[in-house]
Image (tube, grey):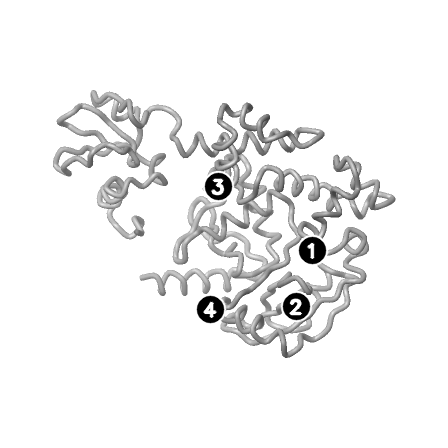
Amino acid sequence: MQPTTLPLEDARWLALTHRDASADDTFVYAVKTTGVFCRPSCGARTPLRKNVLLFDNASAAQIAGFRACKRCSPSGTSPAQLRAQQAAQMCELIAQSETPPSLATLAAHVGLSVFHAQRLFKSHTGLTPKTYARAHRAGAVRETLRQASTVTEAIYDAGFLAANHFYKGADQWLAMTPRAWRAGGAGESLSVATAACTLGLVLIAATPRGVCAVLLGDSREALVHELTQRYPRAAQHEASAQRATMIAAVVSAVDGTPNDALLPVDLQATAFQHRVWRALCEIPRGQTRTYSEIAIALGTPTAARAVAKACASNPLAVLIPCHRVVRQDQSLAGYRWGLARKSALLKREQNTCK
């Protein structure tokens, strides 16, 4: 369903009949025969179109003499907004706590059962609270590793009670050992390949654990320089024949014909970057979202700038589709691999989805 291609009234009626929760904050509908107005996602029986009036917001419906539905409470916070706020509150509590709060503590903080708190948290962040807490603190380690006098000092400064608690998950969050990360990738071996694609050249780099960089450009020298800036002391070598399937899968994705080949990735990221990148991967092909919409979906409505920064730090061009995020006025914002490539990617996806 692509409401943006329809006249506004038709798009809203379509959202109403599909009980589209994503439209809850864009309009309400009133039923003339009952005198009640509802959210688009309301579970009430779908009314006849001739009996429906559409309003931009609840205030307009109330001024017209309609009363709010008791089932979907269209005058208050929407269920989707409430869930996002609860997830954000749990994330904030984790970030502010010296030691990771228990699941029971998180649940009590937002007034949910342990079961529902766990399910809500994972649906919004893609992580369990325990894994998110570890990622958050690992992100703090990542920020301080190069400044701290020792690796151990950085680990304890980030709130880990014992160094071994951090090392258990270090590979997942740093994509290499803490000492190698602190040393700019020293001791890490990157398998590197470049290939022609419809967007110029693509550089693919991988650790033994998976793809860690997909970069776009016009010259191999510039691409290798960009990779070297990210891993200044990592050893680079040409990808072997065993990497052919991985390279082909990446090139296919960049060229707009993704295949089903298993493509493990090896990302270094903070917990917030993981959340943003996951949200980007959920944007359907042919569609876009604004930075503000992503921030709202994450339950952090004032974090549009932070979302933009996370998009800019994306190391996997196209595989993590940061090109699908645009400004509030729908114009193209900055893209580290060039606005021409961003425009080409969006046009190609929109054409294939028609």
Q: Residues within 10 Å of mark 3 (few under 14, many from 20)?
A: some
The residue located at (36%, 65%) in the rendering is: 352
Tell me whether circle 3 and circle 4 mark residues in contact (CB < 8 Å).
no
Task: Say whether disc 3 or disc 2 marks the residue closer to the N-terminus.
Answer: 3
Q: Percent position (x, y) of residue 208? A: 68, 65
Find the distance from the CA under tag 1 to the CA under tag 4: 25 Å
Q: Which mark is residue 259?
A: 4
Left or right side of 218 for 234:
right
Find the distance from the CA under tag 1 to the CA under tag 3: 24 Å
Mark 3 element type: helix
Q: Which mark is residue 175?
A: 1
Q: Residues within 10 Å of mark 1 (few under 14, many from 20)?
A: many
| Number of the front mark, 3 or 2 | 3
Task: Say whether disc 3 or disc 4 marks the residue closer to the N-terminus.
Answer: 3
Mark 2 element type: helix
Quadrant, the C terminus: bottom left
Task: Say whether disc 1 or disc 3 marks the residue closer to the N-terminus.
Answer: 3
Q: Which residue is mark 3?
A: 123
| Number of the front mark, 2 or 1 | 1
